[in-house]
Image: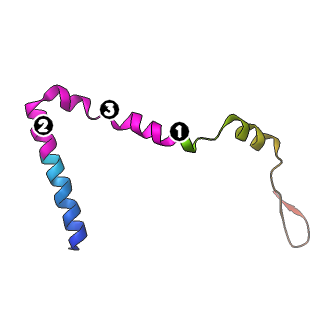
Amino acid sequence: MHPAIRRAGDTTARWFRQGIKLARCHPVRAAMLPPLPLPLYAVLLAPFTPSLSDLRKARIESPSVLLSLDGMALD
């Protein structure tokens, strides 16, 4: 097996074992961890969300038309 893949597997296994250990010691804290990535994901998506003006502009613009070699529009 490639060393990088083995290292990634070992790291993942170590994190999993630490998560199990955390769940045994602090069950309330462990219950709060799974919902944590969702708000972080939403914050990361915010800069890439199109603005209302971009959406209105896309609706107003006419779509492009694909033409064949003889000039006929392809549907």
How busy is the neighbourhood of tag 2: few (under 14 within 10 Å), some, or many (20 plus)? Answer: some
Give the residues in magenta: 18-45
How busy is the neighbourhood of tag 1: few (under 14 within 10 Å), some, or many (20 plus)? Answer: few
For this orientation, the residue located farthest to the top is 28
Name the spot of residue 43 as percent of width and height, x first.
Answer: 46, 37
Question: On the image, numbered disc 2 is attached to which residue?
Answer: 22
Q: Nearer the viewer, residue 16 or 52?
A: 52
Amino acid identity at mark 3: Pro
Q: Earlier in the sequence, mark 1 or mark 3?
A: 3
Question: On the image, numbered disc 1 is attached to which residue?
Answer: 46
Amino acid identity at mark 2: Leu
Is residue 21 shown in magenta? yes
**In the picture, residue 5 is in which quadrant?**
bottom left
Which element is circle 2 on? helix
Question: On the image, numbered disc 3 is attached to which residue?
Answer: 35
* Residue depicted at 91% across the width and 72% down the height: 70
